[in-house]
Amino acid sequence: MSDKKSSDPFHVSSLLARKLYGTLTAPEEAELEAWLNESADNRAVLEKLLSESIRKQEIEHLHEFDEETALKKVWARIGEPENTGSNTLKGYIIKIAAAAAIVIALSVSFWIYKAKSPTERLSYQAKSTEIPPGANKAILILSNGAKIDLQAAQSGKIAYQAGAVVSKRADGKIDYAATAKPGTAAALNTLSVPKGGQYELTLPDGTLVWLNAASSLTFPVAFTGKERQVKLTGEAYFEVAKDPGKPFLVNVDGKQTVEVLGTHFDIKAYNDDPEIRTTLLEGSVKVSCKNSHAIIKPGQMAVNDLKAPLSVRNADLDEVMGWKNGLFVFNDERMEDVLRIAARWYDVDVEYQTDVSQKKLRGIVSKYNNIRELLDNITITSGIHYKIEGRRVILMN
């Protein structure tokens, strides 16, 4: 792990939390292992995080959450900094990360600092809820308009299309085995993921796609032409199979095109979001829209607000990929944006009877928590109250 990342409490706590959740990727495992090998103290932090007794003690104290008091109690379990100077500062940052990770491991949002801007801190209060989190579910729409509920479908071959055989694996994922010859027309299918869902499929060329809630992907059941073209609405993460002779193109609802040969990237393009974000994790992509284009590098994001030319900025990959890793990751996000993301995952509508435009959130929390826990966190720290009527969440003073 680079010095910059090893001293970043938000990044370290994210890795530690995903270690406890069991959702680390192979590169992240290697990154965390490098951090653990930096010192015996680092490895001791993880060992203590894995202690069930410590986690139980933390949850008792976090029921009555106060940032300074809670941190002092965590320090008492992990160990206070002993010296002054740069090494102490680094150790202090690491302990902040460890404290955050303890709370994250309990599926609790825990703010490790309070910014001078109106950034809200979340605390913990466990309650049951009538609205559970989302799950793996989607509808597969065949070329003839027939619909298959993939959550209910049995494993095995589920459809025969002009150009491919569609199968559902035992783990629930969808595979396409191409049968069409090059140059022949192939049928189009659409995978539609509703609010409250997510799904993963393997395209005919071996490309892996993860679709987020309220998203859809239209694609040919076999890539028989000179290009591999798909159409996306909503959000998806792609790991594109390499094929230098056939560029992979993602048409983003007619508003933008992303062209790649073989790479890993995320596109977030919901109709109710003010902009389209394309984030690159590996390789290289060209993003084109009506009035401009940009080639982005790993760690960068192309932002299309549908008005001005594309802009390119550095991306927070932990935040961008949180949804795929089972987490909500918010880094000074507007409360309205947070609730819009939550609404898609929990399949609810949000009604505002108060102004939340100036409120922001920062933290990490499991997306598999129930919605009432998230709303209670917001109430405790922001003074904004809520009530649930059916699948409608109403925010008020």
Image (spheres, rainbow, N blue to C red):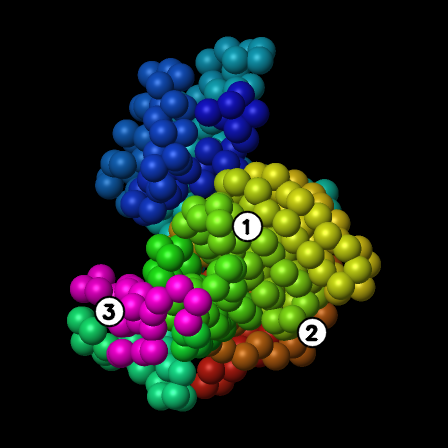
Q: In this view, does 268 lie above or below 283?
A: below
Q: Residue at x 75, y 49 (%)?
A: 311
Compare residues 379 and 320 and report the one nearer the observer.
Answer: 320
Q: Quadrant of residue 233?
A: bottom right
Residue appearing at x 52%, y 40% in the figure: 283
Q: How far across and how far down the image is residue 191, in percent? A: 41, 73
Q: Which of 311 and 285 is in front in this view?
A: 285
Q: Is mark 1 on a helix, strand or loop?
A: strand
| Camera-side residue of 237 and 262 | 262
User: What residue is pinned by disc 3?
Assistant: 168
Which mark is on residue 260?
1
Q: How far apart are marks 3 and 2 (CA)?
A: 46 Å
Can residue 138 be seen in this snapshot?
yes
Q: Which of 378 and 256 is in front in this view?
A: 256
> Considering the image in quadrants, where does the C terminus appear?
bottom right
Point out the stretch of residues depicted in magenta.
Answer: 159-184
Q: Magenta stretch: residue 4 in it?
A: no
What residue does disc 2 label? 354
Residue at mark 3 to residue at mark 1: CA–CA distance: 27 Å
* Alpha carbons under labels 2 and 1: distance apart: 44 Å
Circle nearer the viewer, 3 or 1:
1
Q: Is residue 66 visible?
A: no
Q: In the figure, is residue 226 to the left or right of 191?
A: right
User: Callout 3, which amino acid?
Assistant: Lys
Q: Residue at x 60, y 74 (%)?
A: 395
Residue ID at (64%, 43%):
296
Three-letter code for the amino acid on which mark 2 is drawn = Thr
